[in-house]
């Protein structure tokens, strides 16, 4: 594996419009440019682009307000994720896959982000569309039917988990 560390401007030097769109508050924090970490793996057959940032407001759930915040985020993330996956079904989509990321590297740091796998030669178009989908979601939100469908799915998963609780090995729950 090879790891390169470069600025976002270097990575997207041929697309000024895209750089200007994501170089504002999206990538800049505390007046410092974010770096892009590029990993090349000869065993990986395609490009995977992930854009993550730490969730500055994250704390372990201690209160009902913490729980409600996490549930609201989970619903919003699932809706955006579903929209992106539906987009992938279209032959015109620049993505093979796209979605929302929420991952933790430690107990104290949670990262939120977006990811996509571009079709051959469609990296910049895929990145633009990823940002368009995100901007559209942040501007217009979700429809009532998307929210209700997602809540039903979550309730169903919780119910199924409860029904199967005795079938799950304790090591995976611990």
Image (cartoon, rainbow, N blue to C red):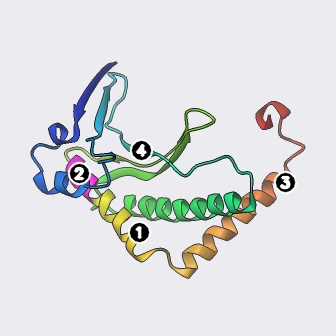
Nearest the viewer among 47 and 115 is 115
Specify the farthest residue to the front.
Answer: 30
**Circle 4 Cα neighbour tier, 10 Å, few/some/many (<14 / 14–19 / ≥20):** some
**Depth-wise, is mark 2 or mark 1 nearer the camera?**
2
Which label's residue is closer to the chain start, 4 or 1? 4
Element assignment for label 4: strand
Q: Mark 3 points at which residue?
A: 162
Contact between labelled residues 3 and 4, with CB atoms less than 8 Å apart: no
Measure how far apart labels 4 and 2 are at the Cα level: 14 Å
- x, y percentage for residue 147? 59, 74
Contact between labelled residues 2 and 4, with CB atoms less than 8 Å apart: no
**Circle 3 Cα neighbour tier, 10 Å, few/some/many (<14 / 14–19 / ≥20):** few
Measure how far apart labels 4 and 1 are at the Cα level: 17 Å
Nearest the viewer among 60 and 141 is 60
**Circle 2 Cα neighbour tier, 10 Å, few/some/many (<14 / 14–19 / ≥20):** some
The N terminus lies in quadrant: top left
What's the magenta region? 122-128
Query: Which dot marks residue 23?
Result: 2
Which label's residue is closer to the chain start, 2 or 1? 2
Query: Which dot marks residue 138?
Result: 1
Element assignment for label 3: helix
Q: Which residue is at 44% across, 49% downward? A: 113
Q: Mark 4 points at which residue?
A: 52
Which label's residue is closer to the chain start, 2 or 3? 2
Element assignment for label 2: loop
Which label's residue is closer to the chain start, 4 or 3? 4
């Amino acid at each position: 594996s090879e790891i390169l560390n470069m600025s976002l401007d270097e990575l997207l030097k041929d697309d000024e419009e895209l750089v200007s769109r994501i170089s504002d508050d999206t990538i800049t924090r505390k007046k410092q440019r974010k770096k892009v970490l590029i990993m090349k793996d000869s065993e990986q057959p395609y490009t995977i682009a992930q854009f993550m940032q730490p969730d500055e407001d994250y704390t372990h759930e201690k209160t009902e307000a913490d729980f409600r915040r996490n549930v609201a985020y989970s619903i919003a993330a699932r809706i955006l994720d579903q929209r992106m996956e539906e987009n992938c079904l279209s032959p015109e989509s620049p993505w093979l896959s796209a979605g929302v990321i929420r991952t933790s590297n430690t107990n104290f740091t949670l990262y939120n982000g977006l990811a996509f796998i571009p079709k051959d030669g469609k990296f910049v178009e895929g990145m633009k569309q990823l940002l368009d989908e995100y901007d559209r979601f942040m501007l217009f939100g979700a429809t009532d039917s998307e929210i209700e469908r997602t809540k039903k799915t979550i309730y169903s998963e919780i119910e199924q988990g409860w029904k199967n609780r005795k079938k799950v090995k304790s090591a995976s729950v611990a």
